[in-house]
Image (cartoon, grey):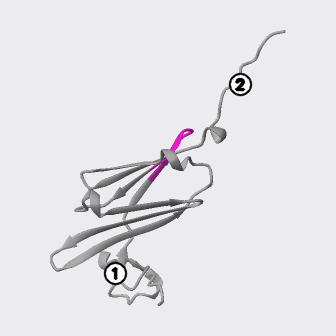
Amino acid sequence: MATRTRENLPASDRGNEAARTEQTRPARAIAPAVDIYENEHELLLLADLPGVARDGVNIQFEPERLTLEATRPMGDTTLTYRRVFTVAPVFDAEKVTAALERGVLHLRLPKSAAVRPRQIPVTVG
């Protein structure tokens, strides 16, 4: 099944939010807006998931791959959000946390201690 991109959409659909979806399965999924912040200790992703309940969120963290899926019931249909990220193998999978607050998913990926910058003390003598 072909992936729909902005370039191969009919002109009438370009700019239409519903038309900007990625074909990930037989059903269509919307790629949610995600802000990404990084500091020396962690990577923080903030994903907009309006109307999604906690039990509607599924996060899979695999080596070098992070998959975020969420569903939101809408009457007799379901809206599906989906994003897949390629991530460097520097994160501590055991310490990844997620919290859903007012329609925004806060996903924290702490960096492994081995890759964090650290101050090296200098001794005299």
| Image quarter (top left, top right, bottom left or bottom right) of the C terminus | top right
Left or right: residue 124 compared with residue 48:
right
25 up-or-down from 50: above or below = below
Which residue is depicted at the point 30% across and 61% down?
A: 49
Q: Which residues are magenta?
A: 36-44
Name the residue nearer the viewer: 32 or 67: 67
64 up-or-down from 109: above or below = below
Name the residue nearer the viewer: 49 or 33: 49
Query: In the rendered structure, are the residues bearing label 2 and label 1 in contact, judged by CB atoms less than 8 Å apart?
Result: no
Image location (x, y in percent) of residue 109:
49, 48
- Disc 1 on helix, strand or loop? helix
Closer mark to the observer between disc 2 and disc 1: 2
Q: Residues within 10 Å of mark 2 (few under 14, many from 20)?
A: few
Which residue is depicted at the point 22% across and 62% down?
A: 51
Which residue is depicted at the point 48% across and 89% down?
A: 2
16 up-or-down from 51: above or below = below
- Disc 2 on helix, strand or loop? loop
Image location (x, y in percent) of residue 46:
39, 53
Kindly identify which numbered label has been placed on residue 76.
none
Residue 27: quarter of image: bottom left
Residue lying at the far left of the rendered structure: 75
Image location (x, y in percent) of residue 41:
54, 39
**Disc 2 designates what residue?**
120
Residue 79: quarter of image: bottom left
Q: Main secondary structure of the magenta part?
A: strand
Left or right: residue 39 compared with residue 21:
right
Which residue is depicted at the point 44% across and 81% down?
A: 6
Q: Is residue 38 visible?
A: no
Q: Is 30 included in the stretch rendered in magenta?
A: no
Left or right: residue 4 compared with residue 116:
left
Kindly identify which numbered label has been placed on residue 19.
1
Give amino acid for label 1.
Ala
